[in-house]
Amino acid sequence: MNKPLTPHQKRNDIQGLRAIAIFGVLLFHLTPKRFINGFLGVDTFFVLSGYLMSSILSRESTIDSSVVKSFYIRRFKRIVPLYSIMLVILAVITPIVFLPSDVSHFITDMEWALPFAENMQNVLKQYDYWDEVFNSPVLLHAWSLGVEIQYYLIVPFIMIVARFGETRKLRMLVFLAFMGVSYTIHLFSSSTVSFGLLFARVWQFLTGSIFFELEGALEVDPTTTKQYETMDHEKLLDEDADDVSIEEGIPDLEIGKKPSLFHKNCATLLLDWTRKVTLMTGFLLLLGKDHQNWILSNEYVQKLIYYSFEIISLSETAAQTMHHFVYLFKEVKYITVYIGDLSYIIYLAHWPVIILYKYYMDLSDLTLQDMSLCLLTTLVISVLLHHSLERLFIASSTSVAVVFVSVVYAMIVVGLLMGGMQTLSDYAHPIGQTMEVSSAAPTTHSTGKTTISPANVTVPTATVIPLTTISTTTKKVEINPQEAIRWNQAQSKVVYFRNPEGCVRDYEAERWTGHLEEPQLRCVSTSNGTAKVLVMGNSYGYRAFPVLHRLFNGRYAQMRLFTRSTRVYLTKDPQSTKFAAREAIVVEKFQPDITFLIEKDSFKTLMKPIVGAVEEDEITKQIQAAIDVLSINSGTVVVDQQYLKPDFKDGMAYMIQKRLQQGKSFFDDLRIPRKDYESIHDNENKRMTTIKNENVIVNRVEEQLCPGEYCYFFNRDNLHSYYGDAASHLTTEGLTLLEPSYTEIIEDFLLRLQSRKSDVPEIRKLH
């Protein structure tokens, strides 16, 4: 057993818990797909904060205004100066790194982060971290600091109420009452509210308070009535007066995805492990009071941490890595304590470092080299600030800290009011720069399925030339960067567009089906021709409709668009089959002469492995049945096969725009070999070739999108992207590639319709 601690001695076990927690946070943010539940560490930090705040305030015989004032001053000096430094540095660096079109979200976050209210922005605007695909939230991590500060504002008053209980048992009952209300809010609120609202998190802070009281109950001599010890207020402001508050919280990653995308039962899992991690932290605090070194090296505690990290990472390998790290604590306790000392600055620095690096380098995932660089940068910043400014502010007078923070905040506010951040971003990213491209092969960085290569460029700041030389492996072309930037920027933001002239809302189809959602994706047009034309599918059919409408050029009696975002018809929709049934109704009622089925395989069903013989495969049978329904009620059925969808977080058009504005000029990495394309879609091709129906035309779009050895994602003559938003809808430039096959299909159909010939080849694949 260790010797008893003096009142102001740091507890190594708490510092060790901090080190483990911040290490988990770093792993989670560096490699979120492996440590997908790493943000559960926020529960540990909140419990530690509750425990430490109870410990600090318990030293007072009474909690009066002077004690509350001293408590607030201590928290202010510990948290706000470093926080303000982070904000002012980011207010300068982020606009330089971010494109002007991306700075607005950062500016909004800054406005909320200044008063420690980032968590309230998320709650009030119902932001979901995992769903914020298009944002680059450099200040996302400020949400937990907001929760911490808000708790510090109310904790003295909770303690005052609790002290009306003259015994520990009564005080714990008061805590339990508050906890019950808070946990009810946490349990029955939306995920956004339960994650970010203070009152949905208070129960975790008070869990720390409960365990502090339990610790005292185990130590108190029953013959004495002394429960609190008076402490000089100046000592409360001393650097080592308290074991430090835990300002760190762990935000979930915006780059990334909702945990449910990785684990089916994630919601239940997280709710269950939120409770377990909260209680486990409390028990470790209870044990660590008199057994600090035992806690850091005991094999049973190591096993407990091992299983916790296996849940956090859903990976035994990752858990073993953490297990070995914890085992080393037996030999490196002082390093662990030191990491605990750095934890607040590590938390402040690591997230912006990762986000800004990934943004500038066009990365979705980090390689080991990238992670090492981000980690090293974070540690260097943390060590330098810890041994300089952090200690300086803690030791300085209150007036020095207040003046410093006031000046920094004033600078940021003036910058916000004057539009300084937007102006700085505009200046840092002028349109139309001169670029000298190195002929050497650039270094590549992995981004999942493709690679991003930063160019070796020289950008004279004073010279603006309208044409820019762009290098590809096969040729150099001159393009107009201003036009390319504006074009790609516009295409990256397209959601809905104006339907072709004369195509009006389809009330008739609404009466047939009762379907009223997304009226923009449905319309009907009449003309003086004889053909009845139907375009169905999801948003990909909606995007193709204007092209088809233009190519028919009025040579139809009625042309109908009936589509719905994300839904699929060709295979079984795992989320809802209602729209597929409505599509069947429209085909039956309308009896079109030709039906175009153009849809994205939203659930990648067509690419799943084939089970048994292709003809007996269950998915193949679903395709055949779906096409037969169309064929019975339609003269000709045209099915577009899937086209490759580049896997980039913000979309291909945005990426090209971003590179141009950053002065980069190498784009040949934005492609995929034709053989890889064919390999990805091999199972789909095999299934489609087995379809037996004389009225079916299979439009193999890969022949148009990949005419050569490589499938390029953009037009190399003008840098117009073939793919628009993050969902990789084809842009107008991409749809142009499909026009020859659509034209051939339409002209052949109209010719056969005119000559009243109904014999169609068994199945034709267009090249």
Image: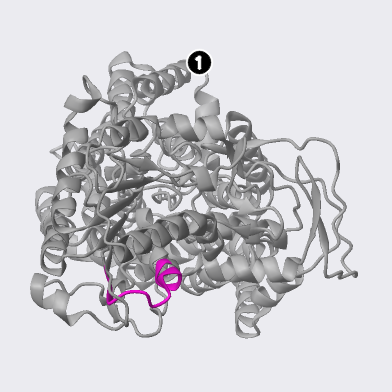
As drawn, the residue found furthest toward the front would be 755
Q: Is mark 1 on a helix, strand or loop?
A: loop
Using the image as rendered, state which of residue 26 and residue 67 is in the foreground.
26
Q: In which quarter of the image is the N terminus?
A: top left
Tell whether 492 sits left or right of 604: right
Query: Is residue 225 in view?
Result: no
Using the image as rendered, state which of residue 350 and residue 587 is in the foreground.
587
The magenta stretch is 548-561
Query: Is residue 595 in view?
Result: yes
Residue 368, located in which quarter of the rendered image? top right
Q: Residues within 10 Å of mark 1 (few under 14, many from 20)?
A: few
Question: Which color scheme is applied?
Answer: one colour
* 551 within the magenta span: yes
Tell whether 9 sits left or right of 303: right
Residue of label 1 = 331
Where's residue 396, x and y in %?
Answer: 63, 60
Where's residue 46, x and y in %?
Answer: 33, 49
- Residue drawn at 21 percent across, 41 percent down: 623
Where's residue 369, x and y in %?
Answer: 63, 31
Vertical position of residue 409 compared to residue 83: above or below: below
- Residue drawn at 24 percent across, 50 percent down: 204
Residue 467, located in which quarter of the rendered image? bottom right
Where's residue 565, x and y in %?
Answer: 29, 62
Using the image as rendered, state which of residue 368 and residue 234 is in the foreground.
368
Vertical position of residue 373 compared to residue 747: above or below: above
In this rendering, the count of numbered labels is 1
Task: Name the kind of residue labelled 1 in the image.
Answer: Glu
Using the image as rendered, state which of residue 255 and residue 698 is in the foreground.
698
- Residue drawn at 27 percent across, 39 percent down: 605
* 191 within the magenta span: no
Tell whether 320 sits left or right of 95: left
